[in-house]
Amino acid sequence: MLVWLGAVPFFLYVAVFLVLPVVVLGVEAFRVTDPVTFEEGWSAANLATITEGAYRRAYVGSLQLSALTAVLGAVLGLALAIAVLRARRGRLLRRLVLTASGVLANFGGIPLAFAFIATIGNAGVVTALVTDTLGLSGFSLYSMAGLALVYLYFLVPLMVLTITPALEALRPQWREAADNLGASGWQYWRYVGGPVLAPPVIGATMLLFASAFAAYATARALVGSSIPLVTLQIADALSSNVVVGAENLGKALALGMVVLIGLVMAFYAWVQRRTQRWLT
Amino acid sequence: MATSGIAGAGGVAPDAPVRPGRRGAGAWRWVVLALFGLYFLVPIAGSVWFTVRDRGTGGLTAENYTSIPGAEGFAETFARSLTIAVLTVVIALVLMVPTVVLVELRLPRLRTTVELLTLLPLVLPPIALVVGVRSVLAWAPDHFFGTPLAEAFFALQRPSLPWILVLVYAVLALPFVYRALDAGLRGTDLRTLTEAARNLGASWPRVLVSVVLPVLRTSVLNASFLTLALVLGEFTIAQILGFRTFPTWILEISGSRPQLSVAVSVLSLVMTWVLLLLISALDRRRTGKESA
């Protein structure tokens, strides 16, 4: 019995600092303040508001950006990881790429945004070079495409980090066995490599999606609030002293994010179960 | 290395019985690597160039870097972030080391639950978490005003040292701390070691200090460095709760001193790099020792 007490601090800590805030979010998102009488009451009005207009656009914008960058990041990261692992005499290269990935996957937020602003922003070094020498212009860092380019800077290394162990578990003997049985490269990937890699690749893509969806600092430093993203809308709602009840609107927006991430995770769990059944 | 790859790809006679259709793979690989290298190096090189170029004379200058320590607000916010980071490391370790050891030795049934709970912060958007934390903190003036509980809530939010950030950052660090410690326990037979110590008459606290901690030393350092890097770069939670930390300071100065803010960004990248190189050096020393 006494042994169970030892696990109490951990569960208590998680309950207070992780579960409680999310539960409060789920409850107080339904609180509204009457703009005339300033009386508080219960209503689903906040939830109705966030599915319309600018808030709806923000959700759609966030989902599009995260889906695009997650898939691109997964494909590019996988290509990079394969290229590095397959390199002959590539131990030094491998160590270099893995260490660099560890650093760059953690290099998000404000510093990353400034690195890109200094390079390809309006007064950026490369921007000046390209416009002066080639006369090219048109790409703006302060757009969805620009954000995607910046997000990939930490998503691709994140993919390399998460998928390398799975790639290393792919035994060369399987490839040799397939070759000896006369399988083509495509057949190997279709019937052996692909099915084995599918669960970890899907899992890593989900992780990339969650990181891109939650990204706030980079977007804040890059575009202020000129791009429709739900994280930026939440921050705006919380800092607004003008609109009555904006605080609760922020809670509803945050709750929406939690629900969407929950749906993505449920989908992931379902896919994981399906692929596992298929494998065995 | 590069020449061997290109020669292998362009050579007439394959140097080994290569499978048909894979001869072009070498060149493909180096093109991919070069493109990625360019993508990842250009922003760093661009930032460095942006900060060392003197806008007036067009020459080179280190002024943006030398002026960092004296910059208004740097010392204050950096010291605060560092303090928060160290406190976060302590809290996360004090919480997780006993839990991980206990689950490993006595409560394996809880393993899945603990693992899932520690993974949650990885997918839960920090901004959603902080909106919830803000709502809870708002209870103090709204509901508990005048009670000791409200006083405690206010004490957590002192701008000079916001303990609430420490407590929330420890949650964000859970996935990294748990995985580092768990990886450290795999591969060591902790059960045998602790049973031996117990049979020889050691008390449980003694076992924790003299057996468990030495076994986990590398993982503990690993977890600490990751947590430090995480806290020193965390922006969302500090900004939404309205505290001034190192990352919010970088954004603050970017309007008036863009070159300085980029210089600080470059330095913080170097800082992360050093922290993570230390981790990989530790890992290597450990694997080297084990294989020897």
Image (cartoon, grey):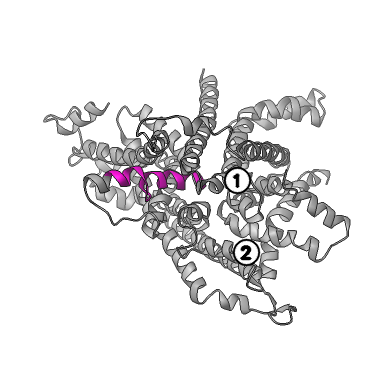
The extreme bottom residue here reads A36
| Amino acid type indicated by mark 1 | Pro
Magenta includes A119?
yes
Magenta includes B199?
no
**Vertical placement of B65 versus B168: above or below?**
above
Residue A234 appears left or right of B162: left
The extreme left residue here reads B12
Say which residue label 2 marks.
A238
Few, some or many C-alpha atoms within 10 Å of disc 1 (few <14, some 14-19, many ≥20)? some
Few, some or many C-alpha atoms within 10 Å of disc 2 (few <14, some 14-19, many ≥20)? some
Res. A176 visible in picture = no
Say which residue label 1 marks.
B175
Please state which of residues A44 and A147 is positioned toward the viewer in this rendering: A147
| Amino acid type indicated by mark 2 | Leu
Magenta region, residue range: A110-129
**At 35% across and 51% down in the image, what residue appears?**
A75
**At 74% across and 58% down in the image, what residue appears?**
B137
* Residue A110: numbered disc: none
Return the chain for callout 2: A
Q: What element carries label 1?
A: helix
The extreme right residue here reads B147
For the residues labelled 1 and 2, the Cα–Cα distance comes to 28 Å
